[in-house]
Image: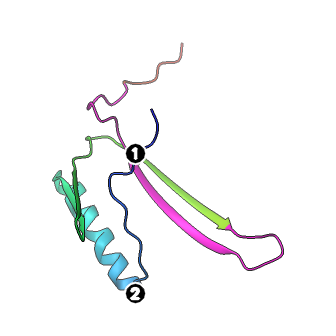
Amino acid sequence: MPEEVLFEFETKMERAEIAGYLRRVADSMDAGDPITLSAGDQSTTLDPSARPVFEVNVEREGPADGPTELSVEFEIEWPEDGDDGGSLSIE
């Protein structure tokens, strides 16, 4: 299935503001509560499964002979149907 963007937001912020947003997400996840994201006329509510996949990527982007940009991406993913995918067995 092709990727469908349900919500997107990007702006420059102070580091403390970003930390506040991440704390609110972490607090909601810790409490098992849904997470609602809103910006302008966009809004979406997510309810991560009990054991989602957590992925962290650090990337360097830019031309080989020019200035580069670093980024860190935190991704939490789970099946929309609620199936956690089962478990691994090795015999």
**Regarding mark 2 in the picture, which secondary structure is present there?**
loop
- For disc 1, the marked residue is 4
34 horizontally vs 76: left or right = left
Amino acid type at circle 1 is Glu
* Residue 72, x across and y down, in percent: 53, 66
**Regarding mark 1 in the picture, which secondary structure is present there?**
loop
Q: Residue furthest right?
A: 65
Image quarter of the C terminus = top right
* Residue 17, x across and y down, in percent: 33, 82
Magenta residues span 61-85
Crowding at dot 1, Cα within 10 Å, few <14 / some 14-19 / many 20+, comes out as: few
Q: Nearer the viewer, mark 1 or mark 2?
A: 1
* Residue 70, x across and y down, in percent: 62, 72
**In this view, 87 is above or below 29:** above
Q: Residue furthest top?
A: 91
Residue drawn at x 28%, y 62% is 26
- For disc 2, the marked residue is 14
Q: Is residue 81 magenta?
A: yes
Image quarter of the N terminus = top left
Q: Is residue 14 magenta?
A: no
| Number of marks present in the image shown | 2
Crowding at dot 2, Cα within 10 Å, few <14 / some 14-19 / many 20+, comes out as: few
68 horizontally vs 78: left or right = right
**In this view, 56 is above or below 47:** below
